[in-house]
Amino acid sequence: MSQKPKPSHGLAACPGCAEPLDSGDRFCGACGYDLSALPAAEAEPDRPTVAIVTPVTWPDAPPRDPGSLSTMTQHPGDLPGTDSGGRDLPTIEVRTDGPAPAPAAPASATASGTGTGGDFELAAPDPRTAVRTDPPAAPAQAPAAAAPATAPAAALCVACRAGRVDTDGYCENCGHAQPRERDHMEREAGPAAAVSDRGLRHHRNEDAFAVSATTLPDGSPALLAIVCDGVSSATRPDDASAAAAAAADASLLAALPRGTHPQQAMHEAIVAAAEAVNSLAEEPGQDGSEHDPHRHRNAPACTIVGSIVADGLLVVGWVGDSRAYWVPDDRGTQSVRLTEDDSWAAQMVAAGLMNEAEAYADERAHAITGWLGADSYELEPHTASFKPDHSGVVVVCTDGLWNYAEGPEDMARVVPADAAERPLHGAQVLVGHALDGGGHDNITVALVPFTVTPHGAGSA
């Protein structure tokens, strides 16, 4: 802080007219007040600096490597210190290979304390690590006459793992935004499982899925998997994929127990999914047109692919470029892609205008020619039935995965060998493969094991 010098007469302003004064003034320049007639200002008492009796000796600086501009790292525990009473401060070992042990909590510590202690670790949030942690259980108490309702427990921050997440989705401790519910999702249904992840480049997850297990009229099991990919250029793609997956799943769960043939049930499920997506375009005030009526908005849209494993039959159905693959347990047996894309590249190959390598090298390769949505062309659900004679696993996925394992042989190489026994783990591995490859798109994969039973079509 800067300070101005005081005048010799001890006044900053004239006592008669309040005109500012300089240190050498004998008279006020405004009113002529005689400043020499004023009594001399009393000198302030001297306040000398108090000497510290106990000498303070600082430790020598850490050695410096030759040619380096900085010294070695010095940790807090390397410096001695005392408290205000002259007693040595307690030291805590500082570790660089992991979290330091937490100091013992005082006896009066309450259950609401964080109690994390040690080094503060702050990593970038990973959607795969998002967990909801309940607070520690309170000690048992005598039952009250009427316990008041309590608010739901707040989530623990995935970044600092110490702060609680506020209702706005940010950590109260470190301020990190928390992963949204759809950023990373995992589900199991019987022996089937699915995993979906936002990926590394998109700001939200526009994929959706459903996995379910039901029974046929004879009591035999049926496994279902539906995967949908929202069209990013359309309005509300995340809502479209969610609506389609839910509608298709509900349709299958209603049709199969009634005895509907699985292939017919799949066809009806895709139609139901299309109707659910079409209804989104009819909802008033949902497309933002009330704010900008002249702005063109595409209707909500998505792709869909599904699989049914029931009674020794494998059924797939699709619209768009999401895919299904057959990967046998015996990797010496051929893997197969079970679907054909509704895309520009597939049309060029089918028409004989390009070979597959040329078509998929074109920048228009992934432009889809079929989708679910109010502005789509005439709906043409594709369905197919297969009867494998050996066991394996059905991979149902969006292009966020198959872009990193496009061919059937490529997919077979990245599917874990025990995927049929551990489908959730297998789906996690496949999502990790896409993330390691760059994670340019949302990634969703469902794995449905197919086991050949003794009364199947052939031997394993």
Image (cartoon, rainbow, N blue to C red):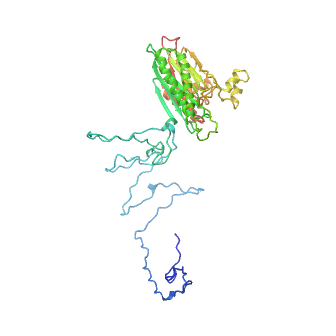
- Work out whether residue 329 can be spotted: no
- Is residue 459 placed above or below 409 in the rendered structure? above
State the image coordinates of residue 294 (x, y, percent, origin top left): 64, 39
Q: Is residue 403 left or right of residue 245?
A: right
Note whether residue 145 is visible. yes
Up the image or down, 101 lies above or below 351; here it is below
> Which residue is nearer to you in this view: 296 or 250?
296
Image: 23 above or below 215: below
Question: Looking at the image, which is closer to me, 204 or 300?
Answer: 300
* The quarter of the displayed image where residue 326 is located: top right
Residue at image location 52% in from the left, 24% down from the top: 248
Q: Position of residue 177 (x, y in %)?
A: 50, 44
Image quadrant of residue 277?
A: top right
Drawn side of residue 107 relative to residue 458, left or right:
left
Whole-percent x and y of residue 7?
Answer: 52, 81
Q: Residue at x 48, y 21 (%)?
A: 253
Q: Nearer the viewer, residue 58 or 307?
A: 307
Q: In the figure, 435 relative to 172: above or below?
A: above
